[in-house]
Image (cartoon, grey):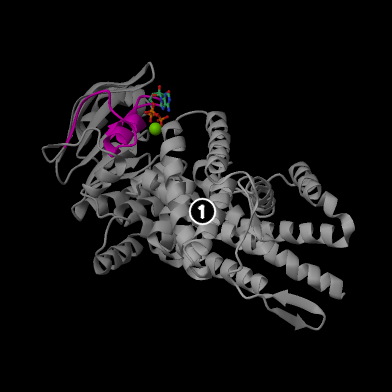
Amino acid sequence: MLEIKNLNVHYGVIHAIKDISLTVNAGEIVTLIGANGAGKTTTLRTISGLKKATSGEILLEGKVITNLSAPEKVELGISQVPEGRRIFPAMSVFENLELGAFLRKDKAEIKKDMDHVFQLFPILYDRKKQLAGTLSGGEQQMLAMGRALMSRPRILLLDEPSMGLAPLLVREIFDIITDINSTGTTILLVEQNAHMALSIAHRAYVIENGQIVMSGTGEELAKSSEIQKAYLGGK
Amino acid sequence: MEQFLQQMVNGISLGSIYALIALGYTMVYGIIKLINFAHGDVYMIGAYIGFAATTYGHLGFFPALLLSMGLCSILGIVIEKVAYKPLRESSRIAVLITAIGVSLLLEYVMMFFVGAEVRSYPKVLTNKMFHIGNVVINTQQIYILFTAIILMILLQFIVQKTKTGKAMRAVSIDKDAAQLMGIKVDKTISYTFALGSALAGAAGILVGLYYNSIDPLMGIMPGLKAFVAAVFGGIGSIPGAMIGGLAIGIMETFVSGYGYSMYRDAAVFVFLILILLFKPSGLLGKNTREKV
Ligand SMILES: Nc1ncnc2c1ncn2[C@@H]1O[C@H](COP(=O)(O)OP(=O)(O)OP(=O)(O)O)[C@@H](O)[C@H]1O
Ligand SMILES: [Mg+2]
């Protein structure tokens, strides 16, 4: 579904992404794990079109989409839940969700998807008239995910959904990610919480200093001693 | 008391003109964080379009108003595309200086074409006086108020309810997040300039009616006052600009109405200094507020 070939990304002279290649197949949950500053967010922002690549290719279902604009990529079915949620705080929960469907015109289907989002996150239904800025951190994460789903994406990019959440809530969010995937949405999940990410991912990549240093199935990586040492608290 | 009410009536009609101009400042600031100093000149050009439309085109008030709004919105879009868009990644001071340059350009290009002299605005409205007790309201004031209120309601509707309006709010809150919704930032900025400039065009005609005279430098003072109004209301806030405009208009008429007309401009700027000293974020300007 999504294929990245020899991608390089720079911030001025900083070479943030160095010749990365990775693949996400239709129906998969793939996770990209790595420490602070490894280049996870940069990778996602380049896929979603917020950051331009210096070289390399990004393909969506075989079609080259490398440096299309973010709105164009949304149109093609890529939806990103950005790091730090980035909901619109001065707008209501309902308006935030509406904006998620900005490019769509199929009113009846939008309504259906909205109901589906409320089903996944019942708390959002109770809060729909409330300003999004007044939601708790966990609720904001749910809103950001619901908003991203409103574009009815083919592939959902998630940037550290566990950030700043209590363990119980992290569990809940990850269960919902699995749910979303099981209804047919392909997922690329970026995480620092390697333990949780590996537990739900079909496959995983490890990124260090802008380079992919390891890849395999979620299970394989969870067992690997290097991963244990570096990311899982070295049991 | 009657004197007070009379000044109120005059102040509100002048203030609603300031409010219309202030809205353009505040909307543009909200979306690209630029104090668009050329905005007062768009309003001046709106006044000339109205002048030409009524004097030479023999149009009535409403057709002239629509024509001026339409042409000014195109002018606003062009100014943004030509002068500001290429500087999207530049420092704010560079854009600000460019805005001052655009302002001077518009003033002196107009002077070249229409001359520097003051022209008197044609009487497009039959001037009737209405007496309510001893307070006098004339036709102009009624038209000004009526037009300003309709336009502000329309603007609120566009910003709150339409897709374009929601896009404008989203872009002004968070450009990256807005793009991830599929919103085109450049297009949305163009819309914002178009809307703000259309309101300035309307204000241009209204002020022509109010003062009966126009000249190429007429945009400077009302532009600055409307800017003060926007700062007072909380720059970036739409309701703030409306309240700020009314407040400045009322303040100005009271200062001149009670015999200090020499100081009416100075009063506005003293007021600006006081705002900046004591409440720099303005009445409604808080980070959590809705900003456009
Ligand atoms: N806007 C920017 N300007 C310059 N350098 C940047 C910018 N954004 C990121 N970088 C650099 O690029 C590298 C990768 O950053 P990135 O944000 O992609 O890391 P990350 O893996 O998402 O980290 P974290 O887990 O902390 O979110 C870092 O060295 C960072 O300093
Ligand atoms: Mg990151």
Judge whether B48 appears above or below A222 on screen: below
Amino acid type, label 1 = Gly
Q: Position of residue B7 (x, y in %)?
A: 80, 67
At mark 1, the secondary structure is: helix
Q: Position of residue A122 (x, y in %)?
A: 39, 64
Q: Is residue B265 left or right of residue B42?
A: right
Front one among A151 and A64:
A64
For disc 1, the neighbor class at 10 Å (few under 14, some 14 to 19, many from 20) is: many
Q: Position of residue A145 (x, y in %)?
A: 35, 51
Q: Is residue B273 left or right of residue A180?
A: right
* Residue at position x 76%, y 45% in the image: B269
* Residue at position x 26%, y 50% in the image: A178
* Residue at position x 67%, y 63% in the image: B210
Q: Quadrant of residue B290?
A: bottom right
Q: Quadrant of ligand 2?
A: top left
Q: Position of residue B274 (x, y in %)?
A: 79, 45
Q: Magenta residues, as a range?
A: A32-59
